[in-house]
Amino acid sequence: MFAICLLMVVVPHVLASDILIKGGTVVNAEREELADVLIKNGVIEDVHAQLTAPAEATIINAEGKYVVPGGIDPHTHLSFPSITGKDTHETFLSGQSAALAGGTTMHLDFALPVDGDLEAGIKRHDQKSELAVMDYSYHVPITKWSEKVSSQMAAIVGKGINSFKFFMAYKGALMVGDELLLDGMQRCKQLGALAMVHGENGDAIALAQKTTFESGITGPEGHSISRPSYLEGEATGRAIKLARVTRTPLYVVHVMSKEAAEEIVKGRATGQKVWGEVVAGAISLTDQKCWDPDFKIAAAHMISPPLRNKDHQMALRRALAGGHLHLVGTDHCGWNSTQKAVGRHDFRLIPNGIHGIEERLHVMWETLVNTGLIKPSDFVRLSSTEAAKVFNLYPRKGIIAAGSDADIAIIDPNKQHVLSARTHHSALDTSVYEGMHIKGKVVTTISQGKVVWDNDKLSVEPGSGRFIRRQPFAPHIYTGVKEQEANWMSEEFPYGPVPVKRKGDKAEGRDEL
């Protein structure tokens, strides 16, 4: 039985009441200020000092606390199917409940195609999300290419999904080659969608996995050994160069290494529109636990690309602080210990994935804010605002302002707590963050204008979740793309107009003599 059963209150359908948050420090990505926040009908109505509470409004005292936009996790896998056909133990109900307990009020999940059929994959995911308790949207992976897939991409964009993912790893399952990646990037640009890549060299990893296993290394440590950081760097750099050829904006998911981060920095230095996502585990954990003698602990830490050593961890923290990487997700993929045990004697069979949808904001606060690397306003940008802008949810999401959705987290910066599987709200029986001490806790979460987490208690309504449509051509992504495409040739080859006219070329209507 998982912890959520002990702490979750299922409430009947109720309308959002007026709420006044008083006396807190309201933090947005651009600034912070002492102000009150008035919420009516699920929307923020006013942000100003000394607001008057409407009659019968719920008043929340936020003195000494930070009032921040609800977190947006750009990378999750709830009810995710494995190659064996079984889903992750973490469902939409349990995973979203955990998210709300950690201050995240919106997430973007991956709707995996059914044998390459994109629309069938979305239909399957819609069925799995029927008990959703918060706002969500989808990314759609592209695993095969055909005229049907290209046509389906257009239809899907019309339904409010503006991002497609391409796996450069998982040979024989999800991996795509460069030709498909190029076709997919061009189609994304035509549709105003965002191309996303999992950057690892799948061919090289398949070989390394085989040689590692055949050498007698069969446990979880073999996972890290067979997926070195330079293969992540190589694939990330290749994807960025292919995006340069097609002049397509690119989003690199779960950057786990210095090498991959450096490739993103180099790409942006040429003027490319490239974004790098880091996951909470990468800035708080290392791969050391994959060598733990307890298989259950070691397997729990397996994620692809794998966790890296302390040098990579610190480099990623500094890259986020310096603006070289741009937002933090989780890649939350909740396999329990029983599911991971299928690979007890072959690391290649262990389902990949760690959790973090509940812990993300706390881990970010501890590793980035409490260490002095970033300010609370940077925290908001990395945890919410940038994702809202990248995926065209802004300013509906990602900001505390009049007219925005009333999705808010209140953080007590002085409250200390310890992360543990015994107290988390995930369905999982382990925690990769077990025993981590945190100073700073989400004490209240407001979602859709309703208090869903307060005083360590959840109040959620299964089925109240909303699929949020996202329009194509996000300004944050696509502004300037047409101009870059029109000017790139003259900038790289400033030698005159093309095609060059030469003596002996065919003139209009006749051959030159």
Image: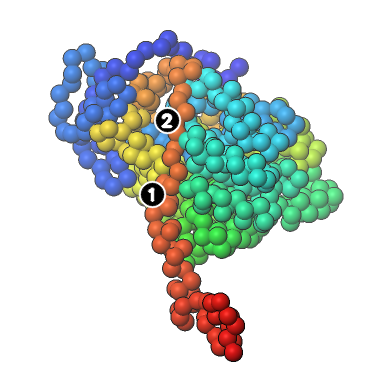
- Amino acid carrying mark 2 in the image: Thr
**Image side of residue 59 versus residue 217, left or right:** left
Q: Which residue is drawn at 45% across and 19% down?
A: 464
Residue 352 x, y percent position in the rendering? 67, 39
- Residue 278 placed where, x, y %? 51, 48
Residue found at x 49% / y 42%: 162
**For residue 503, above or below residue 374:** below
Q: Nearer the viewer, residue 429 or 407?
A: 407
Q: Is residue 237 placed above or below 279 in the rendered structure? A: below
Front-most of residues 65 and 396: 396
Q: Type of residue at label 1?
A: Pro
Q: In which quarter of the image is the C terminus?
A: bottom right
What residue occupies the far top of the structure in this picture? 12
The mark tally for this picture is 2
Q: Mark 1 points at which residue?
A: 475
Q: Is mark 1 on a helix, strand or loop?
A: helix
Q: Is mark 2 on a helix, strand or loop?
A: strand
Counting from the top left corner in percent of width and height, residue 497 is at 46, 78
